[in-house]
Amino acid sequence: MRTQVAIIGAGPAGLLLGQLLQNAGISNVIVERRSGDYVLSRIRAGVLEEGTTRLLREAKVGQRMDAEGMVHHGVQIAFMDQIRRVDLERYADGKSVMVYGQTEVTRDLMEARAKAGAVSLYEIPDVSIHNVETDHPSLQFTVNGEKEILECDYIAGCDGFHGISRHAIPSEIRGEYEKVYPFGWLGVLSETPPVSSELIYGAHSKGFFLCSMRSLTRSRYYLEVPLTEKVEHWSDDRFWTELCSRMPESTASQLVSGPSIEKSIAPLRSFVVEPMQYGRLFLVGDAAHIVPPTGAKGLNLAASDVNYLFRILEKVYHAGRTDLLPRYSGLALDRIWKSQRFSWWMTSMLHRLSANPFDHRVQLAELDYFTGSDEGLRTLARNYVGLPYQDVG
Ligand code: RFL
Ligand code: PHB
């Protein structure tokens, strides 16, 4: 088998890259370890930056998002029993964010790919990467008991944090930067109307909470919990009681609780691999970086990596600009480190990082400053809606 770009992983990064390449007449094959249904069952991100929504529209998968997604012009920050609004439009030059679930983005991309007749191979457990230092890279794997070799010009490693791609970069070249936090997020999805029309990020002495949503009838809530917590110990009742105890009273009294449809604990991590290119292999999305979800940046960073790699490959195939290939890693990492900083900062400002009362008072002063001054609100809003993309040249 031969294709121009071999893509490992059918998460949002792999599917979006595949769709943009397909529309530009550049052939690609996606090889995914899991089944399509499994990929669609993962409940993850909910907030899309404008750059991400623009790219989805460019990929011609924006119709349902524009019809069903909810544009949010502000977010709320709760602390000390009060709520302050960050007016995104006012403080981020008229920009806003779109609330539309990652599951829906993935479904739209999968449907568009099937319609375009592009090849996706699911349930392939043994992909290996070969010859990326040469002009003849390939993937090898087994399909229906037969060994298959997929020859290509370039490989996009879109296989997430637990994938194989980044390990194909020799350890003497690969730099890894990591920070692991001592807590996780316990998330609940429920068929109940959201408690607020805008997202609420909350700091409380018992820990962080987040009120988010997927639609006007479906809510997504999170609680900071110690890493030692087990999801089995959290009945729905215990979850709702704990959530209400962390919210300002006026909000808690509005909460509509109900049975959970999904409940899970996700650990929080900051992680970056450098460089993101080795020979003809390019790392994209969670394969190269993880952010704690407090800034809603993970999926959006995957989209901005896709943006850079797609623009470069388009110029390589349509204008012979192979000189641009070495620019990918630097362009992507510039935006990644800025988003890492924002995600780490939001996490530090809103979670219970220390039992020292001094640290707690500094946190409150920081929250007061960033939600109570024009310069603070501008910094928060501009980072939250997403920093601009650069030209690839
Ligand atoms: P994914 O989605 O992990 O997809 C990678 C795919 O690769 C497959 N794979 C392999 N395939 C073949 N061979 C192998 N050896 C393979 N190994 C792995 C996997 O099966 C999978 O299908 O990575 P991708 O595409 O880079 O997308 C990244 C996003 O999924 C992730 O960054 C976001 O979900 C993070 N995130 C959020 N991001 C946002 O932008 N906004 C948010 O509001 C937001 N909220 C969140 C989040 C992540 C969360 N969790 C669970 C970590 C909330 C949570 C709770
Ligand atoms: C979500 O809706 O799942 C969500 C929203 C905002 C975040 C993280 C997760 O920062």
Image (cartoon, rainbow, N blue to C red):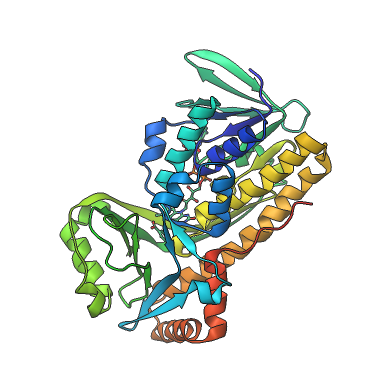
The quarter of the picture where the N terminus appears is top right
Please state the horizontal and vertical placement of residue 297, each as a whole percent of the image.
51, 59
- Position of residue 147 relative to residue 196, above or below, is above
Q: Nearer the viewer, residue 85 or 342?
A: 85
Q: Is residue 323 left or right of residue 245?
A: right
Residue shown at the point (45%, 26%) measured from the top left: 123
Farthest-out residue, left: 237
Task: Judge by depth and name the residue closer to the eye, 217 or 77.
Answer: 217
Indicate the position of residue 270 as horizontal and vertical percent values. 53, 59
Is residue 178 visible to the viewer in this orientation of the structure?
A: no
Q: What residue is rendered at 50% in x and 72% in y?
A: 88
Residue at 41% in and 63% down: 182
Task: Give residue 54's position: percent from left, percent from top.
Answer: 57, 52
**Vertical comparison of 125 with 353: above or below:** above
Residue depicted at x 57% and y 76%: 379
- 90 left or right of 364 in image: right
